Amino acid sequence: MIYFNSDYTEGAHPLILERLLETNLCQTVGYGEDEYCENARNLIKKACGRNDIDVHFLVGGTQANTTVIASILKPYQAAVSTKIGHINVHETGAIEATGHKVIGLECKSDGKLSAKAVEDFYNAHWNDVTHEHQPQPKLVYISNSTENGAVYKKSELKALSEVCKKCGLYLFLDGARLGYALASPENDLTLNDLCEYCDVFYIGGTKVGALFGEAVVIINPALKEDFRYNIKQRGGMLAKGRLLGLQFETLFTDDLYFKISHHAVKLAFKIADALTENGVKFLSTPISNQIFPIFTNEVIKRIEEKYLISFWEKVDEERSAIRICTSWATKEENADKLIKDILEIIKEK
């Protein structure tokens, strides 16, 4: 069985494992205050082109999302997402468990949240005479890439930023798959752009070459104070914090993070192009490392005999969309096998 269901089915990039082994018996202080974490912070600051940002390493995406959101919002305030946004669907109520409601707004099939949708909802809230009886929107959550594999354009992020500033909202970007978004041929954003338009975002490591870990980047000075207290309280602070620093130090040396992200996107496009050439339709246009081809249910059953893929959504009574996900570790030979087998199954049908 070959896995194409997710982008974190493998362990870690070999260079990270080598670095962890090399430094295994070195003694350092704990909780992310060691020299490896400090060097990783400096490398990320350099990649972002900003020295005025704070960088914190957390153990995972759920911890990053809950810690950031809970640290920003007052007890009666809420986060605004799309209806299919990760925090609204796949966090098991983690945000709500911190005491903050997630408000899901409608979005197009690409999963992006538009500036207009945010402004319309904000105005509707404050124009409602009963607004004090409802959770107050205060933070806008987006992910790049989105749950449906789309990437935000610079103009879209800029528009969201302008609306958030106009309405007094914070803009938080979930970057669990940020490497793959930045590697997309459709991308025109840089890390520096994210620093300009977001109040806070994070750089995902778990899905992009690390064993585990995310790097939270705080730009807004108002959100920096006491953030480490929040990390500790929310269970995101690793005692052996140097394990996180070493991984991001490796990922941001010699552009490794960006190189391995490009590898994943290249193979996703190789699969998508081959399927497109043979008449396969997609739920959404392939843009990043997640692609969503549509097949008959019978064809999907045949594919699942040899490959682990994810059911995504029902299209009609006979067809469904699946997710094929590539990663930094996907072997080109496996991508070629997948293409060959799918095309043979389609021809048989």
Image (cartoon, rainbow, N blue to C red):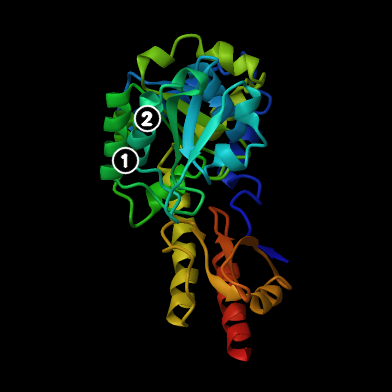
Along the polypeptide, which appears first: circle 2 or circle 1? 1
Q: Is residue 7 above or below residue 319?
A: above
Left or right: where 94 falls relative to 123? right
Which quadrant is home to the C terminus?
Answer: bottom right
Q: Which residue is mark 2?
A: 122
Query: What residue is at 68 percent from the left and 24 percent from the top?
Result: 25
Expressed as whole percent of the image width and height from the top left, the position of residue 265 reads 45, 58
Left or right: where 165 falls relative to 324? left
Q: Residues within 10 Å of mark 2 (few under 14, many from 20)?
A: many
Which numbered circle lies on residue 56? Answer: none
Q: Please tell me which residue lies in front, 329 or 69.
A: 69
Q: Is residue 276 above or below residue 192?
A: below
Residue type for callout 2: Tyr
Q: Secondary structure at mark 1?
A: helix
Expressed as whole percent of the image width and height from the top left, the position of residue 26 reads 64, 22
Q: Which residue is mark 1?
A: 116
Outermost residue, bottom side: 348
Quadrant of res 276: bottom left
Q: Please tell me which residue lies in front, 52 or 147.
A: 147
